[in-house]
Structure formats: C-alpha cells, structure tokens
Image (cartoon, rainbow, N blue to C red):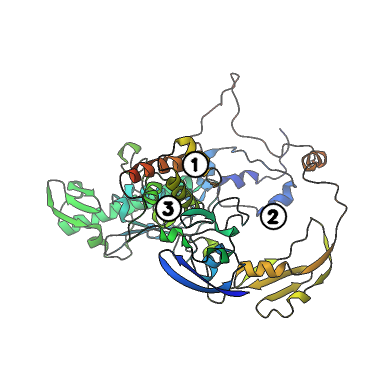
C-alpha cells in the first residue's frame, strides 16, 4: 500500500513514498525526524500531537497520511518565520506559560488556529477553545494569559 | 507510644543517606501505604542530610568559570518542568555576582556533575540550593583574593559587579573573573566557609526570570526521552494480557511470518514486535493471535474501591515522635526551615 504523497511541510514541498494508512504523527516523528509534535495519548484526546493542516489545528495521531495529499502542514518547528518567533511563541515564553513543555507545541498551534477563527477572543472563548488540550503541569492560567497577550500583539499587525 | 518496629525509620526522612534500601525498608515495616512524618530533632537530620555532608566539599564540583566569562553550573538534579534549570542558575548568579544570562546549566551528566541520588520530593531547592550557594560564595571570596593580588589592592577596597572585581574608589582598576580563573580549576580553598548573602542582599533570586528552557520548548527543539532517535534503533511493542493474572495459552504469529521488516521476540509469555517505526510495530502486533486463560476476576473498575477497603489491614502506628502540642493545641517549637 506504499503510495506517493505530495504536500507542503513547513513551507517546503515534499514528495513522500509511504503507506498512506500510517498516521501523520508517526510519519512526522519517525520518517521526517520532526519531534515537535508529541505522542501523548495516541487517541486524539490530549492534543500534544496537534499540527496545522491548512491552518487548522488537527490531531496528527488520528490523521492517515494519505489525507494530507495536496495540503499544507505546519508543525511547531515551522511556526517561526525567517528566524522570527511567532507572537504566540514569544507570549508563551514571556508569560512562563510552560513548565515541562510537553503540551506546549500543541497548545501554541491550537491557539494559532483559534486566533485565526477569532482574532479577539474573550477569556471564556479562549478557555473553551483550549479546553481539549491537556496540561498536566497546571499551566492553564498562564496559557490563557499568553494567548490574550499574543492576540493583542497580532491585532497590531502580523497575522502569522 | 508504640514500640518502634524499625529503629532507623527516621533516617529515611533525613536525607539521601538511606540506611535501608527501599526493598529492605518495606520488608521491615510490611506493605500498605506508608506516610512519613518529619519527626525528631531537625538539626540532627540536617546534619545527616547530603546537602551538608555528602556532596563534594570542593566548590569546583559545582561550578566552573570559563575563559570566555561564562559560568557553568554542574548539578545532578534534572529539569522536568519544576523550573530548576532557571532557579538554581539564579541562586548561583546571585551568590557569585554574575549576570543570570552568563550561567549555563549542565544537569544530570554523571561524568561531569556532583553525585546525586535523584530529583524527587521537592528537594532540589532546599537541599541542593544551599551547598550550591556555599560553593559560589567560596569561589567569589577566592576570586576577590586573587583580584587583590592582581590589582595590588587590599581586599576591603574591592567590590564585585557582574563578574568584574573592581576598586570601589576607581572603577578603572578592574579585573574580570574570567581573567582571574582562565578557565581552569581554582586550586585554592578557604579553611572557613564565607557567609552566604542575606536575603535582603539578593537581586536575582526572588524575581521572575525568563526560563532558560523556554525557547527550546516553544520551538519544538526540546528533546524528551521519547524523542531520542539513535541510528539502527527499533521500537518494541509488547503484547499485553487483557486482565491482571491472565495466562498465555497459545500464540499464533503466522500472520507476520512473511513480514521481513518486523522482528518478533518471544521469551516465555513475553511477546514483543520490533520495527524502526513504532506505529508499524503496533500494527504488526495487532496481527498476532493470542489466547489467554482468564482468571475469574471478582473485582472490576466499579467494585475496586470497595474491594480495597475490605482487604486492607487495620492501620497501625509504626513509629511516633517529634514535636508535641501544647495544651492550647499549638506546636511546642517551630521548625527553623519548614519544608
């Protein structure tokens, strides 16, 4: 069932010979060496494996790799552009919105997707939008603050 | 008070010098849930604890000043989200009088770092922090001594700022830590440990600092154990029995017979499938047909709590001691350094 899949990964076009039934998470982590997307639960529950597919936050542990044919995938490694961190990355640093950091890539990419949909979310909308990304360290309050702060900065100019 | 079953019990709480191994300890006191109370004379415990006795006496084990002015801190403690990669660096920077940004942390490298039993029990700050500060204070005092010889000035005329020792009356008369240490081990020790800074003198400790690991964590560069990939490495997926106490009756791996890529490991009732990609190993494992003899389980996830209460033995006091209460219900004395 090995097939050829063409897609864009972190800004670069890619052709991959791969079993299309394999999950995107493992192709990213094993075949392509991108370990930013984390293996948390493997069941689509925790959000640690979140990546952007056509700018939408998606649980990569649930996506057969054949489904990304012709699409654009962004992992946490591809969020900074030209060496400049995305406002969300800066805000997570400045607000100390991370401890062990295992949930952080998924948190940031889920927040990215959320802010594209709702550029000026209320606190309640952030909490609702981030509710399915789990953080065992208990960094939620700072994570919400970081997203609020990034949303303010992004309103000023760069969208991401 | 009940007779003590294990005379050495309080030592378990006293520090990393376990007088009994964990296994011996549980053998001595039996199973069940053990709750440790801090009991007895805390000062005696402190003397026994490694921060005061077991860590190396030589400050060089804790820190090194590079020829480029960067300070490397060595610790057997590891970062796991609790923040010590930053907070221990803050403690060192403050005591040594160098900028926080000049400190690099080397953590848990057993070739380089001072001996440590592990990172657990909220002990890093309390038990590793003080000896690290002592090491920094001693290093600073020695560097001031070296600067005094170098600048031909009396020590009491010298002040330190950001890794630079200077004449307090003429800041042009100055020498950096880097110039004094030249990246080498400082073969000089003080007979008496210099005092640590008073809390009111601390400028870096107690203030929120940017976490040293933040950048690597927001860019996906941080490596966790599961992210480590070594050339030629395979992942193993293990066949798990459906319930506790199940016995493997028969196993059929014929579905994988023609699969050249996976490797099957069988050792008694342990069966694993190996492949360079973990998901491929997992999928291959699902093709193995196994039959188990299932025990007649009387407990399930609904009845487990009731079951545990039924089979639990009566609780008993194993040892007792420590601080008694006054008639008013207040503690007789206060601990000097509460944990």
Residue A132 sits in quarter: top right
Q: Nearer the viewer, residue B60 or B107?
A: B107
Query: Can residue B195 be seen in the rendering of this structure?
Result: no
Distance (Cα) linking label 3 and label 1: 21 Å
Question: Percent position (x, y) of residue A146?
Answer: 41, 43
Q: Is residue B124 left or right of residue B255?
A: left
Question: Percent position (x, y) of residue A140?
Answer: 49, 41
Question: Percent position (x, y) of residue B85?
Answer: 42, 53
Q: From the image, tell me which residue sits under label 2.
A: B23
Query: Can residue B291 be seen in the rendering of this structure?
Result: yes
Assign a secondary structure to mark 2: helix
Residue B332 sits in quarter: top right
Q: Nearer the viewer, mark 2 or mark 1?
A: 1
Residue B105 sits in quarter: bottom left
Q: Is residue B245 left or right of residue B56?
A: right
Chain of the residue under label 2: B
Residue count near mark 1 (Cα–Cα under 10 Å), binned few <14, some 14–19, many ≥20: some
Distance (Cα) linking label 3 and label 2: 32 Å
Q: From the image, tell me which residue sits under label 1.
A: A140
Find the residue positioned furthest to the right: B296
Distance (Cα) linking label 2 and label 1: 38 Å
Q: From the image, tell me which residue sits under label 3.
A: B85
Find the residue positioned furthest to the front: A70
Q: Residue at x 78, y 76 (%)?
A: B254
Q: Nearer the viewer, residue B197 or B286?
A: B286
């Amino acid at each position: 069932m090995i097939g050829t899949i063409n897609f864009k990964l972190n800004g670069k076009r890619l052709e991959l010979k791969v079993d299309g039934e394999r999950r995107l998470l493992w192709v990213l982590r094993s075949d392509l060496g991108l370990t930013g997307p984390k293996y948390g639960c493997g069941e689509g529950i925790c959000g640690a494996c979140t990546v952007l597919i056509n700018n939408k936050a998606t649980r990569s542990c649930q996506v057969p790799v054949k489904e990304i044919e012709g699409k654009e995938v962004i992992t946490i490694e591809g969020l900074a552009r030209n060496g400049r961190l995305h406002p969300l990355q800066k805000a997570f640093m400045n607000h100390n919105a991370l401890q062990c950091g295992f949930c952080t890539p998924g948190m940031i990419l889920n927040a990215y997707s959320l802010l594209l949909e709702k550029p000026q979310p209320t606190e309640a909308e952030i909490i609702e939008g981030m509710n399915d990304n789990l953080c065992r360290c208990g960094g939620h309050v700072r994570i919400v603050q970081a997203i609020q702060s990034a949303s303010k900065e992004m309103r000023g100019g760069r969208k991401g | 008070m009940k007779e003590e079953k294990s005379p050495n019990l309080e030592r378990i709480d006293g520090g990393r010098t376990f007088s009994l191994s964990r296994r011996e300890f549980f053998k001595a006191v039996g199973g069940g849930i053990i709750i440790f109370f801090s009991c007895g004379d805390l000062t005696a415990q402190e003397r026994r604890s490694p921060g005061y006795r077991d860590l190396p006496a030589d400050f060089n084990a804790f820190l090194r000043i590079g020829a480029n002015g960067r300070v490397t801190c060595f610790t057997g403690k590891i970062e796991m989200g609790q923040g010590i990669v930053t907070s221990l660096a803050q403690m060192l920077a403050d005591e040594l009088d160098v900028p926080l940004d000049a400190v690099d942390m080397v953590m848990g490298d057993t070739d380089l770092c001072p001996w440590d039993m592990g990172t657990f029990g909220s002990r890093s700050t309390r038990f590793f922090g003080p000896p690290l500060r002592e090491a920094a204070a001693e290093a600073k005092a020695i560097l001031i001594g070296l600067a005094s010889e170098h600048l031909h000035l009396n020590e009491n005329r010298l002040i330190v700022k950001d890794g630079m020792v200077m004449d307090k009356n003429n800041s042009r008369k100055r020498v950096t830590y880097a110039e004094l240490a030249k990246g080498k081990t400082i073969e000089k020790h003080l007979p008496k440990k210099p005092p640590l800074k008073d809390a009111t003198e601390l400028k870096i400790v107690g203030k929120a600092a940017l976490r040293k690991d933040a950048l690597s964590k927001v860019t996906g560069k941080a490596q966790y154990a599961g992210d480590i990939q070594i050339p030629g490495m395979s992942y193993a997926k293990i066949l798990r029995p459906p319930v506790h106490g199940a016995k493997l009756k028969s196993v059929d791996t014929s579905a994988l017979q023609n699969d050249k890529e996976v490797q099957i490991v069988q050792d008694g009732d342990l069966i694993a499938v190996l492949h360079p990609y973990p998901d491929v190993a997992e999928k291959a494992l699902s093709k193995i047909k196994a039959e188990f003899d299932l025990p007649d389980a009387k407990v399930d996830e609904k009845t487990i709590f009731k079951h545990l209460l039924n089979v639990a033995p009566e609780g008993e006091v194993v040892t007792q001691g420590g601080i008694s209460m006054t008639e008013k219900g207040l503690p007789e004395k206060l601990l000097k350094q509460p944990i």
